[in-house]
Image (spheres, rainbow, N blue to C red):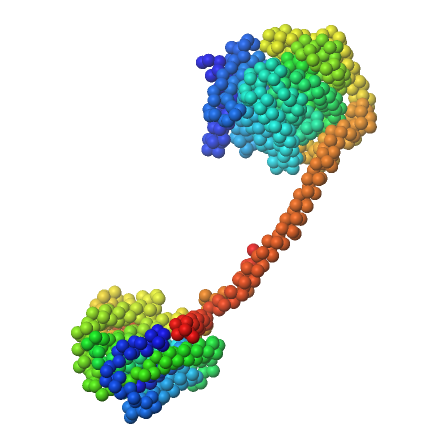
Amino acid sequence: MHLAYPVVLSALLFCTGLYGVLARRNAILVLMSVELMLNAVNLNLVAFDVWLSKAAEETLRSGQALTLFTITIAAAEIGIGLAIVLAVHRNRGTADIDRLRDTAERPERSEKAEASA
Amino acid sequence: MSPTAAVALAATYQHPALAAVETRGFLSPAGVEIAFLLVGLVTLGAAIVTVTTRQLVHAALWLVVALGGLAVEYLLLTAEFIAWVQVLIYVGSVVVLLLFGLMLTRAPIGRSPDADSGNRWAALTVAVAAAAALVWVVVDAFRTTWIDLDVPAAGSTRTTGESLFQNWVLPFEALSVLLLAALVGAIVLSRKAKPEPVEPKPSTPATGSAPATGSAPTTGSGPTIGSAPTIGSAPAPAPAPAEAPAAPAAADAPDPSEGGVR
Amino acid sequence: MTTTTLAVLVPVLPFLGAAAGLLLGRTAPGFVRPLAVLPTLAAFVLAVLVAVRQGGDRPVEAATQLTPTGSVPIDLALYIDGFAALVAVVVGLVATCVQIYSTGYLRDDPRYPSYAALVSLFTSAMLLVVYSGDLMVLLVGWEIMGICSYFLVGHYWETAEARAASLKAFLVTKLGDVPFLIGLFALASDAGSFRLTRILDTVADGGLDHPTPIALLLLAGVAGKSAQFPLHTWLPDAMAGPTPVSALIHAATMVAAGVYFVARLLPVFTASAAALVVLAVMAAVTMAGSALAALAQDDIKRVLAYSTIGQLGYMTGALAVGDRGAAVFHLISHGAFKALLFLAAGVIIHAAGTNSLAAMSRMSNLRARVPDAYWTMTVALLALAAIPPFSGFFSKESVLGAAESAAEGHAASAGHVPGAAGWTVLVAGLLTALLTTAYATRLWLRAFRGQGDEAPDHGRQPLSMTVVLWVLAVPSLALGGFAYGTLPDWFDGDDLAPTLTTSVLGTGLALTGGIVTYAAWRYTTALARTPLGAVAAHPEADAATVEAEAIASHEPAYGDVASAPDPTDPSRVLLGRLHRHAAVGFHLDAVYTALFVRPVLSGARLVRFLDREVVDTYVRGAGALPRLLGAAVRRAQTGNVQTYVSALLAGTVVLVVAALLVATGA
């Protein structure tokens, strides 16, 4: 099988996830998109591992092992991420990422402060 | 990695057998390749729907399709153990967890017009640009690289297990510690900031606290403990009055009534 | 103890007292009064001891050099001749009297600790000036006196008059001090030393290259400190300070420092005939003008202030004719009776509740309320008017005698004193003698011979305030008669005995002035009396409070800080149309305002305009661009994490593509 197929699929999946991370408003949807990106990487790892399976003694089957690790870490990440989202939702009443803007510059107040200074 | 460097790398690892069959055309797919392509298309389509649909719950369900499609791709790539792990963990627990998250944050059912933020066009631009760059690079790099799928299965449970417990024991154990940390972190994050002193009898929590947390993880994978069992017990706090104040995990639900309303 | 040790202790003791008073003033109020009086008293006793040991013999000299100071060395030097010893005694006496008096006068004043400490410091600085044998050390004391006078004149800083007066005193004396400093440097560079002895030796050898510029520069500082024309304007305004401070400034310290300084360095001045003529003209203008102004003042303390200026004019006149013995003689006797006059005036102001002579002249029986002040002030006024046998007569006659001998060209001490200087001083001195008696008589008549309502009765004055009056009355009464024979032993040896011609002339003119004033007074008291008067709001409070209120209310009550619209004032008859001008000090303040204050103020306005409108425009312009950029950059801080990540990833993609293009050589 041509290696380009899984690799291109992986790249496209990754960019789909990227789009989701950047464009989705709901934090849980963002987490889903992150999962997509992680899975794209997993596919890449598996594909390369199979490609190099003849040299398995040298590569220690690192592709598949790392895929397993990634899956585990992704599970942990989704747990922690959801806990954070829930905490935020409990405190703020919203899980929308673009409404959590505490670090934003507040133009009207700063202008006033500047005028008084 | 630049394309040329990638090509060089590929050439280094090229098997002599693969070099011999380089006469195979780029557009002469075998059966497995057709299957891979079709499933890949489905997966990609499901992923795209996942990130674009306006129905939040549907997004989670489409994510199931995408992840399942990926599991099939793993099978086609002869990594069968990974494929089953994928199905078990992603489809079985992560998506379920995400669905619970949607419920707990009162995500609306049905079309929500504001599922996408105002950042959509910038996101699209960045994503398309990144996709173009990546596809260009990998196609350029792996133009002449084939995978030989005829060798004995590289990803059977036996080989994976042997590799994992021969060469990767230490990272494996480190990862278990990481999972434990994630478990504790999720519990800490999701408990209420100020647990109110509900218990009039001081003797009960001392006996019940340790077993209560210990018994929780039976439901599924580690990190899910924090929220999953809570929902189950939330509508009926009465049956375990001795356990309710003892388990800090029980306090994480924003409101027991909230889960009930959903 | 050696004489040197004693002499060092004399300025050091009040200084330590001042330091201790400032440190303990808040924490231990019980120690403040002893700490104020005792060091000054001790310094006085030590000064007497030093004077006795020195005894008019060879000068006591001692010097030590703390550190090398370059080409012209500065020594901590003592130089105590007869002048220094006696002047120190007067300073100590007056300062002690003032400290004792102040304990009663500022009985309830919350700022008494700092006041007493500053008076001690003031005294210490003056004693340093008196004993110092090095001009740089002298300058230190000179400047400490300047800053102390600033604080003390501004003691009632709640009143606008006191604030303005303290600033004026400071600025005007500093105005004189700048040329004074330059003159000191010029003198030291000519003589190669700041030591008094070296300088006097150089002058005696004729080694001074530029005597006239040096003398004139030094004269500017002397005129500022000793309140000589044209830098005298601060002194009448300084009456806004407490009366004991006025007594201290006028009698012993500050104004005496200038005269004393010239007396010490008289050879430098006599080396330049031009300087002597300038000094003589300055003295003549000062004494005649100030006597006229004193005649027109309504504030009792301002009368005394102008009289101080006039008496200082006598002293500078004596210096101008080269007789420093006469000058210091008059300085000493004047110190005694002027301190007495001021302290008695403080008692009167307290009793009357006003500082206005016009208001006092409408109170009958004021003299019965303050018998001590009445009698001692009479003595002091007679001394001021130079009526024999009071001390002022002898000292003033010694000045006039010296002027006469200089005018006739046989001056004993300095043969090259120009005759013009002698004549100027003589004529002005005789004229001033007439005017002095006139204003002294007016003061006495208006204060003690008032007719009208009964003077308010506040009971007896504090003992600390009345005793010192009698202490000071003794030298005012008798010093001159006993001293004129022995003083020449302490001084240069010139005869200080009054000569017949000037005595007859001076006394005759003085009596004339008194009689004429009495006649005018009789004439004006017969006129219809318009009701007039304002008294302090709290007549039962302590003297300092009464005085501060009196000063503050004079201008609202009478329309002017110096004069009152009183038609019964005999000076209106005597001066006629001149009265209006004399009351405001011959418009010198107005002239200064027009010449200096207004240009400076408009210059300040111009600078402010340039700073605000021109310089600031550039500053604002320089700030505008960064502010604009900052506003633009700030817009990027939306707080939206997705925007940030989008920018980050877009940048990553761009960088990766760029890296790829470079790596592939495209």
User: Residue C232 vs residue A91: left or right?
Assistant: right
Give the camera-side residue of B199 and A114: A114
User: Residue C203 vs residue C569: left or right?
Assistant: left
User: Residue C217 vs residue C586: left or right?
Assistant: left
| Number of numbered labels in the structure image | 0
Quarter location, residue A103: bottom left
The correct choice, above or below, for C637 with respect to C262 in the image is: below
Q: Residue at x 56, y 13 (%)?
A: C81
Give the camera-side residue of C559 and C68: C68
| Quadrant position of the N terminus of chain B in the picture | bottom left
| Quadrant position of the C terminus of chain B in the picture | bottom left
Give the camera-side residue of C273 and C302: C273
Q: Residue at x 52, y 28 (%)?
A: C117
Estimate the x, y position of residue C511 in percent, counting from the top left.
Answer: 76, 14
Estimate the x, y position of residue C204 in percent, counting from the top left.
Answer: 61, 14
Q: Residue at x 68, y 24 (%)?
A: C228
